[in-house]
Amino acid sequence: MNAHAATAQSAAPAAAPAVLVVNNIEVIYDHVILVLKGVSLAVPEGGIVALLGANGAGKSTTLKAISNLLRAERGDVTKGSIEFRGTRVDSLTPNALVKLGVCQVMEGRHCFQHLTVEENLLAGAFTRTGRGEVAAALDKVYTYFPRLKVRRASLAGYTSGGEQQMTAIGRALMAAPTMILLDEPSMGLAPQIVEEIFEIVRDLNARERVSFLLAEQNTTVALRYANYGYILENGRVVMDGDATALGANEDVKEFYLGLASGERKSFRDVKHYRRRKRWLA
């Protein structure tokens, strides 16, 4: 493991070894636009790690770099490395990563609208062998998402946003992942449904030992369920730490939770350079 890997791994909670280590990666789109500028992070075995930041900070790009989906968008990792269970996976295809146990649930859910809920789930079972194994995986998904069992014959395009998010996560579970990259799970969902989704994430983490790296703008919810967090701004990690400590940090309260000394504050009154100076000093 190189020095960058050691640095990233040391940032994760010491209780468990890192299952995923991102080492100082840079990402460029169209050979010109530098989006990620030396991002390092680590996800411990059996952990839930939150990747936080405003829209455009680089959260989705980081997940796509890990799952090797950048090339479909004319993006490339031009520096650094990505390791999963101690092995470099930068050059692997997305389907090879899925077979290793890494699945991504995309922002916006991306269900197959013209297929039923159950057909969407079965589409994620391409790594399974044998009908019995597929049936057992399907039963497990329905255990965690009983609402999907009720809606299994419905076209996914006619289900609610929450049901589509459950379908997308369930489809990933069908591939027997040991790690899920979850991009903006709360996007466009009612608060009650967001809580339900995150409770299921917690259950999957506790019972199935699935590790999660979740990119999320809803800092309040993410830090309540995560063990550790990284805050991205303009393609750089500007702060990281234990989720509880981040949630109590005055800078995080002010700039991401909209709280300053217990009171609401408008982001329009916050000077960007001021917080960069304070955080990077």
Image (cartoon, rainbow, N blue to C red):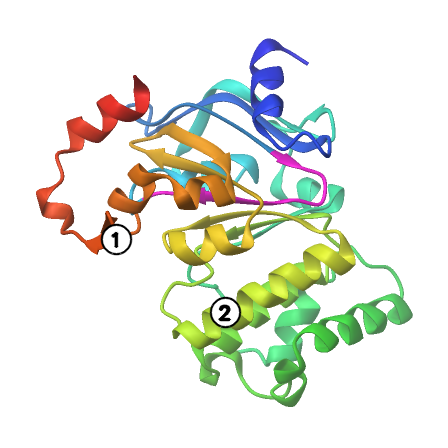
Name the chief secondary structure element in magenta: strand
In the picture of the structure, the residue carrying the numbered disc 2 is: 195
Which amino acid, mark 1?
Gly
Q: Can you identify the residue that label 1 sits on?
A: 262
The local crowd at label 1, few if under 14, some if 14 to 19, many if 20 or more residues have their Cα within 10 Å, is few
Side of 128 where 13 appears, left or right: left
Q: Say if 8 sits above or below 53 in the image.
A: above
Q: Is residue 138 left or right of residue 186?
A: right
Q: State which quarter of the image contains the C terminus.
A: top left
Percent across and percent down for residue 132 are 90, 71
Q: Is residue 66 above or below residue 98?
A: above
Q: Quadrant of residue 53?
A: top left
Q: Residue furthest left?
A: 269
Label 2 and label 1: CA atoms lie apart by 23 Å
Q: Amino acid at mark 2?
A: Glu
| Left or right placement of residue 159 versus residue 142 in this view | left
Say left or right for 252 vs 105: left
Where does residue 103 sit, x and y in percent of width and height?
63, 50
Residue at (70% x, 70% y) in the render = 122
User: Which range is magenta?
Assistant: 43-53
Is 94 in front, or is 18? 18
Q: Nearer the viewer, residue 2 or 279?
A: 279
Q: How far across and how far down the image is residue 196, in percent?
A: 54, 72
Circle on res. 155: none
Determine the residue positioned at 60% across, 79% down: 117
